[in-house]
Image (cartoon, grey):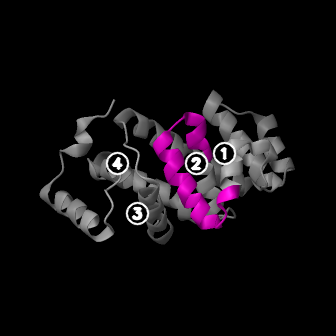
Amino acid sequence: MRLDILNHGYGTGTKLLFTVIRLVSRHPVPDAAKLVFYRPDFYGDRAKAFTHEAMRGPSDWSVGDRELMAAYVSQVNGSAFCVAAHSATAKLAYQDAPQVTAVLDDLDSAPVAEPLRATLRMLGKLTREGTVGADDMRDVLAAGASPRQVEDALAVCAAFNVTGRLADAFGFGLLTPEDFEAGAKYLLKRGYR
């Protein structure tokens, strides 16, 4: 059910910003952006800072890897908006749409390195079951991921478990493929700030 709050409740400055974004980009302002501008002191500012650090901060994972993690976690959660947004961004970051599609279709047969596959498998379990254990972590480390990569992947997982649930709770509207691609270009250029 779409909550109407994403259509109203903004100050004059934010409304003006949304108008400028629509005019300059020729694309609608995605609901994800609208959400972080609604009560930024309560949610938006913190969410942007955390997500930007998880997705664009220093990491041994590439931007494409982290966007793929976001898409994968979102798929496990069944968040259509987030899957579309982050698979579009991963495809653009990797410059390899078939690889992203393959991972989302069948992780076990997808053409990705074992550390990433094991990490995605662990993130999927954590998202589905709400818990992972020492054996799960040992499997990821044995596949070649470093402890720091595990930490970074868990940050991505946390960010998109929250974002995906909010997307569904607020009923984020799906965009056209062209709109998602424009959003992907923006995210690759500017990040999540």
- Which span of residues is magenta-colored? 72-98
Image coords of residue 119 (percent x, y): 73, 47
Q: Which mark is residue 163?
A: none
Mark 1 or 2: the one toward you: 1
Mark 2 or 3: the one toward you: 2
As helix, strand or loop, the secondary structure at mark 2 comes to helix
Q: Which mark is residue 104?
A: 1
| 93, above or below 110, in the image | below
Of the 4 image quadrants, the one containing the N terminus is top left
As helix, strand or loop, the secondary structure at mark 3 comes to loop
Q: Which residue is mark 4?
A: 31
Identified by mark 2, the residue type is Ala
Q: Which mark is residue 193?
A: 3
Identified by mark 1, the residue type is Leu
Q: CA distance from mark 3 to mark 1?
A: 27 Å
Mark 3 or 1: the one toward you: 1
